[in-house]
Image: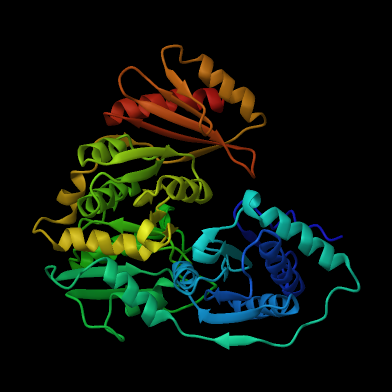
Amino acid sequence: MSDLSEIVKAYDVRGTVPDQFDESVARALGTAFVEMLRESGDAADEIVIAHDMRETGPGLSDAFGRGVNAAGAAVVHIGLSSTDELYYASGALGLPGAMFTASHNPARYNGIKLCRSGARPVGQDSGLAIVRRRAEQLLGDLNAEADGPTRVMRRDLLTDYAAYLRSLVDLSGIRPLKVIVDAGNGMGGFTVPAVLGDQELPALPLQIVPLYFELDGSFPNHEANPLDPVNLVDLQEAIRAQGADIGVAFDGDADRCFIIDENGDAVSPSAITALVAARELAKFPGSTIIHNLITSAAVPEIITENGGKPVRSRVGHSFIKAEMARTNAVFGGEHSAHYYFRDFWFADTGMLAAMHVLAALGGQDRPLSELAAEYERYTASGEINSTVDDAAAKTAQVRAAFPDATFDDLDGLTATLPDGSWFNLRASNTEPLLRLNVEAPKPDRMAALRDEVLAIVRG
């Protein structure tokens, strides 16, 4: 039996090609995915498949399709796609899906994000562990099933995807905006012209200035990871040099977006969560909004002030999506710049979040820095990683050092102090790391609390 535990992660498949992840593995995973769906009672007569701009995407996705065919199911292949376009296809067509991407990982990686029909997530606890075990059996079986009849239908859904997003956020009546978009040579370079440009749909009052729109899975300009500040430098310089109103940076598969204001300063994903939450609550009064536990304390405050019901979640898309489905939440936001929408099958889409920000900015006359300031109330550290030998012991030491704090253990250790400052310390699931997030009313208080916790963790 082959061991796929190194590449089948908590939420997806991710590995280096071809030493960890090759076409034989992809084929086995295709068959295993169909078999898992059928065993759990889901229809699996057709599977929709897509891939991003990585060179290995076409070969791996076609091999997965052969595995799907071997299991007796047909393939609807939509070709080049962002991850949220694949979620659109899964929702609109009512089909399970497989997106071949490694998001922001380096060029030698590829992977698969799987979903059930309606873009419902597949993780370790919702079928991915079963897929792994069955694929391992297939790879170890010399008499594994032969390829079935080729049943592959090619479809182009890009215009349909763009039109659907435009139906959710109307940008036609906003003031003209100059928007610089850094696609990082990822799939934003493919989807932005369709959604925000005028490829097939009517033109919008947006001047889109493209930065690194050439699809290139080797990422020649910078990593397609907007959470790392070094990858925002080019966009920030372009905004200042060209006098743009706003900058938008996408990750490799364009399911995350990061917003930069007219001064070249980053807008916190927590502020974006609060801004979009306020817009969604104006459309759907009294609705539930999900936020993860490392978003700013301003997020639940603003949700409540706008008549909504904030619900706190663990970090991670499977937890957010599960909470959204359980509560029928209209929107959910994570501090990692993932944004989830009920109108988008509870799935995450960086493009739709960016459109909400453009609509909010273009619907009034102030610059983005002033608009965003309404949603930025506290000072945050950002996530700080520390390598530790014993995460549990370090966490216990930190807990003991703050006797006046109120603690909860929803996801790691969250401590709230009497002055309103708080921090969260949680262990990585895959590495010997502790991740620290700190927030306080003032910058000096945040810095002092951050340094106090880090001194214990790294002591």
The quarter of the picture where the N terminus appears is bottom right
Q: Residue 177's quadrant in the figure?
A: bottom left
Residue 403 in picture, x, y percent from top left: 46, 11
* Residue furthest out toward the top: 403
Give me the residue at 34% from left, 29% from top.
Answer: 446
- The answer to whether one can see residue 366 in this image is yes
108 over 393 or under it: above or below: below
Residue 30 in picture, x, y percent from top left: 69, 71
Residue 233 in picture, x, y percent from top left: 35, 59
Give me the residue at 41% from left, 12% from top.
Answer: 404
Q: How many numbered marks appear?
A: 0
Q: Is residue 122 left or right of residue 292?
A: right
195 over 382 or under it: above or below: below
Q: Residue 201's quadrant in the figure?
A: bottom left
Give me the residue at 17% from left, 59% from top.
Answer: 361
282 over 448 or under it: above or below: below
The quarter of the picture where the C terminus appears is top right
